[in-house]
Image: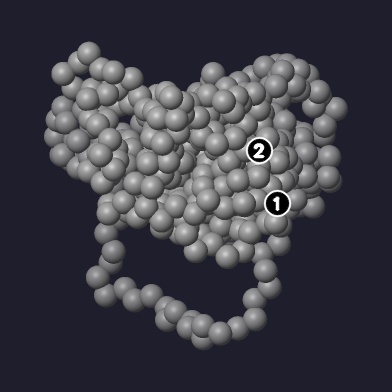
Amino acid sequence: MARAQQNFICQSCGAVSTKWAGKCEACGAWNSIAEEASGGIAPVLEGKRGRRVKLLPLSGDEPDAPRIQTGIGEFDRVCGGGIVPGSALLVGGDPGIGKSTLLLQVAAALARRGCRAVYISGEESIAQIRLRARRMELSESPVELGVETRLGNILATMESGDAKAPSVIIVDSIQTVMTDALDAAPGTVTQLRATTQELVRAAKRSGCAVIMVGHVTKDGQIAGPRVIEHMVDTVLYFEGDRGHQFRILRGVKNRFGPTDEIGVFEMTGAGLQQVENPSALFLAGRQEDVSGSAVFAGIEGTRPVLVEIQALVAPSSLGTPRRAVVGWDSGRLAMVLAVLDARCGLTLGASDVYLNVAGGLRISEPAADLAVAAALVSSFTGVPVRANSVVFGEISLSGEIRQVTQSEARLKEAAKLGFTRALTPAGITARPAAISLDEIPLLAQLVEDFQDQAESRNY
């Protein structure tokens, strides 16, 4: 019998090499290469031809994908309206952020709506899951529990072939599942790739939707090769700061819906609670007469969200001033600071700059440029942003303030929460009657306004 070939595989990117090395040449990760036995792949036989592929025209009438509604509106929103039968979902997040809690609530909600929901854990015992369900008041939900790490047993449960086959099966987590066909430890790249592929195939064959929990690395990415994310239909990230009670469920890939939706939850002693109005929650307890604070009217997916941006500009005693950013792109902050220095004459280069997005939300759209600049200038001059004002707009390198998309939706959300003014780019036509616009074509105009207010206060 031929001896199994030994390969060295990077546990971060999946690159294969014939010898061990301390650093992966493909992704640059250190101490990530592990030795794994390869069962070998049979070569394609020469001269063996396959059958001809049946080709169809692009046009045709196809019904929309059916959905399984969970009843948890925030979860259904991120999934695109519900779970598609036969689809594969991958949920990732930091340890202890609430992934298992969320999916146990999803299973309980599905079971109460008549769907057969199966929750299989490879990390907890039945007693531990029942204790958590009792704390969340879900003990009476008809969810079926199982503890299993063998792939073959999980596949047999999914493909029972009778009327009692599960509609949704949750696997917590994919890093604990293993197949005996491979001589590799659970959680290695080889096992992850093989078990995920078989689970996705079984989901397509049986029509049972499978939801897999994935661990994340220290960089916040789902552990294992990125090919796992390409295999599944939907990838969701459960984000949040343990210092806050807010949790964000963000869709980063969805073959059956939008990829930029978010769902907002609040962690309580009884589990996760939906947040119907995230803007009011993110702005709770905010003081309006404090410098360095601005309310940004943003868009997350199809939902307008108002969030507070806090900035602090302080004298620095270091040779290289400190730049600390939480919830925003540090490169974008460097660009805004450069425009304020070069185009507006502010001397912020010798000051420490701290920027924070309140509530643990992470902002990625360029429309936050003007709100960040307003918070920075407000902190530098000591003048608060005008009361009951929201801010949005993109800053160009020339110092111009450019329009952003969905301005009307942003202003409507601000009017709903009682805001009466908005600092915006020039040229906005549609707006609610309750909001007056302060159009700012150039960033220098905003800086002059704050400086004039600072001078009048000194007099």
For disc 2, the marked residue is: 278
Residue found 52% across the figure and 44% down from its top:
391
In the figure, 92 relative to 432: above or below? above
Q: Residue furthest front?
A: 459
Callouts 2 and 1 close, C-beta under 8 Å: no
Quick one: quadrant of the C terminus?
A: top left
**Which is more N-terminal, label 1 or label 2?**
2
- x, y percentage for residue 293? 50, 30
The colour style of the image is one colour
- x, y percentage for residue 280? 68, 35
- x, y percentage for residue 5? 22, 39
How packed mark 2 is, by other alpha carbons closer than 10 Å (few <14, some 14-19, many 20 or more), is many
Judge from the rendering whether residue 229 lies leftward or rightward of residue 322; answer left or right. Answer: right
| Distance in Å between CA atoms under marks 2 and 1 | 21 Å
Judge from the rendering whether residue 285 lies leftward or rightward of residue 296; answer left or right. Answer: right
Near-viewer residue (191 or 182) = 191
For disc 1, the marked residue is: 434
How packed mark 1 is, by other alpha carbons closer than 10 Å (few <14, some 14-19, many 20 or more), is some
Which numbered tag is attached to residue 194?
A: none
Residue found 51% across the figure and 86% down from its top:
57
Q: Can see residue 314?
A: yes
Quick one: quadrant of the N terminus?
A: top left
Secondary element at image label 1: loop
- x, y percentage for residue 399? 31, 51
Near-viewer residue (88 or 321) = 321
Amino acid type of the residue tagged 2 in the rendering:
Pro
Q: Can see residue 220?
A: no
In the figure, 46 relative to 29: above or below? below
Residue found 65% across the figure and 38% down from its top:
278
Secondary element at image label 2: helix
Amino acid type of the residue tagged 1 in the rendering:
Ala
Near-viewer residue (171 or 420) = 420
